[in-house]
Image: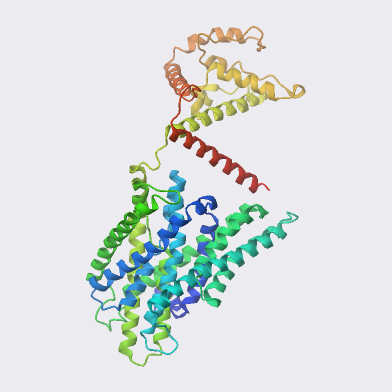
Amino acid sequence: SDHSYGNAIVESMKQWLGINGEVIILTFLPGLLFLDSYNINVHLFIQSFWQLVVFAFPMVLGGTYLTALVAYYFFPYGWSFDLCMTFGSILSATDPVAVAVLLNELGAPPRLKMHISGESLMNDGSAVVFYTIFSSRFFYEFGLDGIGEEIGWGKGFALFFRLAFGGAAIGLAFGIGTVFILFHLDRRLSGEDSVIQVVTTISAAYLSFFTSEILAHCSGIIAVLFCGVTVKAFGETLLNNLQLTHHFWEITEHLLNALLFALGGSVWGEIIGDQTYTEGQGRLFARQDWGYLALLYVLLMVIRMFLIYSFYPITKRIGIGTNWKESLFAAYGGLRGAVGIALALSLHAETIHFTSSIPNESAQMSFRTSTAKVFGFTGGIAFLTLFINATTCGPLLIKLGLVTPTETRKKVLENYRQHMIQFTLVEYVKLMTEDRFQTVDFMVMKEHIPFFNEITYDKFMIAVQKYKDITPSKGYLEPSIEHVIPYLYEPETSHPSNDEKVSPGLNETITDRRSILKSSTRRDSVANIRKNRRRRVATVYDLNEVFDEKEVREERMIFVHILRATYHRLIEHG
């Protein structure tokens, strides 16, 4: 073979370009989109639906048109306007994977997470709809019978509504059917039922996409979106093993993302360095093309910022609302990724397939060069947004104050921390009833468990009493605490009462504590304890205080969040 072993992977990846573009889309998109649609907060999705519609359709169409103008007037490649519109629709699809992980890690507001994830799902669907329309017009330029279609404005709007509403109807039908099957498998008799339920969800995802996209010629992505949301809303409580389903889809999404980016990256690297399309006159991506890529990246950021704030007066007043900080982050966090790469790869693969019937080699090479450039720019934009935007979204989120904990949340965390300390103390007292732990040096414990430095005599004795209260009298063993008491700070007003049952020798040990307090380590511990006592007092709510509306609303939101988490935890345990 003329090819070295080093090119084996690239050559195998290039074989994908000979596969029908519909197969590429059908392989990747259903598996990538179902988990995202299933994980969405259904309540917030319904409340923000019309906001997401504004994000998805008018804004995507505006972004498609403005990006097409950039390609048509700024790029020197002589692309037709239909190809420019196809290019614009490809770059309109956003991918929130990296940003969504960051939002969850930093604890961003639920509204912002809904806007990022919901917009991505909806505009992926609308971007594919516009891609279908304008790629058909572009393929019509090939002049081949049965390839492409010259779609006018009237037919274009009719096709848009058919793709969008038809896909939604098919997705709802498959979602309801999936819920019906899950209901009859909700038996929890064996692990086989859980496996069949998982197989049912993946079958629903791919069959809904195939039925909508291939058979009904509607939007497959919108079908998967509505199928996933329907299953989440009505079928989540019917899953025998929720963790199994989640883990399966997480692994599937991870593998498909890895395969798609590996495939796209290899083909992208081969295309931008290829000389096939230039007849040996240089690489497809020359030096000036990298300059155009940088210009395109900057203009895409400007276009997205312009669109977000152009519709800001509308999105602020409908749905769940928004503010200028969240809008700024949403504009900056519009990454490009899996869907755009899949569409660009599909466009280039279909162009290679269709143009093989064109007798004019010059025209054939011209079309292939144009779509290769489109794929090159799409891959470059995906790389730049992941490398620049994704890595700087965290500092921007913090700078905008979108993840700064409020006083209410600080109080909740501090109270949780105090409960954690008390629970740990009770468990520690329980261990002190065993002979093997009675000689453990408490100073060693303090070195390895930092919050033990904050333990006071009062706290410790409360834990001792609590352990006694929760332990049956027949099984109660008195803990050995003589070696712990000398290291505990006791306020002047706190003394063991006369009726307290303490171990022999405990009073003598308490008498010697003041000598131990003289050590520098002890003084540091006392200072920390007093500091934390003041902090703990600040967490006590004053019932006579008049709370402002924002604080009360946030407390309610926290309560609802805790309630929802408890509800889902109960679902996970059947």
Q: Is residue 476 left or right of residue 418?
A: right
Q: Residue 105's spot in the image, x, y percent?
A: 45, 46
- Where is 59 relative to 522, above or below? below
Give residue 120's quadrant in the image: bottom left
Count of numbered badges drawn on the protein: 0
Task: Judge whether 511 appears above or below 51 on screen.
Answer: above
* Residue in front for this viewpoint, 463 or 525: 463
Along the line of sight, the residue nearer the viewer: 339 or 140: 140
Q: Tell me: 306 left or right of 187.
A: left
Res 8 visible: no
Residue at 37% x, 80% y: name it: 138
- Horizontal and vertical percent for residue 303? 30, 61
Q: Residue at x 31, y 70 (%)?
A: 68
Where does residue 566 sit, x and y in percent of width and height?
A: 60, 41
Q: Residue at x 51, y 68 (%)?
A: 165
Location of residue 272 in the rendering, given as x and y in whole percent from the top left corner: 32, 73
Please identify the quadrant where the N terminus is shown: bottom left
Q: Is residue 175 visible?
A: yes
Taking 21 as reference, is 451 above or below it? Answer: above
Q: Residue furthest right?
A: 474
